Each structure stands twice: as structure tokens, then as C-alpha cells.
Image (tube, rainbow, N blue to C red):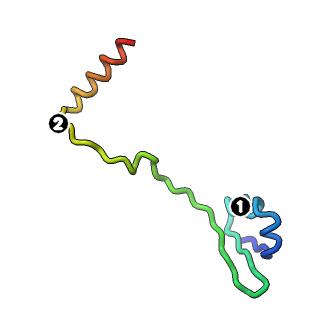
Amino acid sequence: MKTYSYSKACSDFSSVFDTALNEEVVVKKSNGIMFRIISYNEKKSPFDAIKGLKTGVPNNEIVDIIKDARASY
């Protein structure tokens, strides 16, 4: 864990983020209030928000249509 003063964190914020990639960072203000900065990587796909559609068409038929379309190029 690395601790930065508030003024140092403000003047060199990119360094705070770079450090937070590898370890926890604490920013301490002169009045004693502390902020903890940690990095995290949310492993979600951007496609998770897309809902599927019920087409009534079997999967193998959809695959055949796509293969036919690709073959025509």
C-alpha cells in the first residue's frame, strides 16, 4: 500500500493511477480524511446487455443461411 498526500496526488494524478494498477493507494488529506484507490477489471462483455430474440428458426438453419451468404462473396 502506498500513501500520497492530497496535494501530491492532485499534482501527479497519473502516477496515483499507475500505482493503483499494482497496489492499493491511499490519499490522505490534511484534515485526516483518507481515500482508498484500488483498480479492478470488470470482466464483462459489452454484448452482455444485448437481449436475444426468439425467431422460431432452428440454429442449424441460421448457420446454413450464414454459410450460404458467405459463400456468395
52 up-or-down from 1: above or below: above
10, 35: nearer the viewer: 10
What kind of element bears circle 2?
A: loop
| Residue 67 screen position, x and y as percent | 32, 20
The residue most toward the top is: 72
Of mark 2 and mark 1, the one earlier in the sequence is 1
Callout count? 2
The tag on residue 26 is none
Along the line of sight, which residue is nearer the eye, 20 or 33?
A: 33
Determine the residue positioned at 68% across, 60% down.
22
| Three-letter code, disc 2 | Gly
Q: In the structure shown, which secondary structural element does the residue marked by tag 1 occupy?
A: helix
Q: Which amino acid lies under the numbered mark 1 shown in the image of this protein?
A: Phe
Q: Where on the picture, by quarter, is residue 1?
A: bottom right
Query: Quick one: 22 or 72, which is closer to the camera?
Result: 72
Q: Residues within 10 Å of mark 1 (few under 14, many from 20)?
A: some
Q: Quadrant of residue 66?
A: top left
Q: Which residue is mark 1?
A: 17
Q: Residue 26: x, y in percent?
A: 71, 74
The image shows residue 21, relative to residue 51, as above or below, that is: below
Residue ID for mark 2 = 56
| Residue at left offset 45%, top offset 48% | 45
Residue 41: image x %, image y %? Answer: 56, 56
In front of the other: 53 or 16 = 53
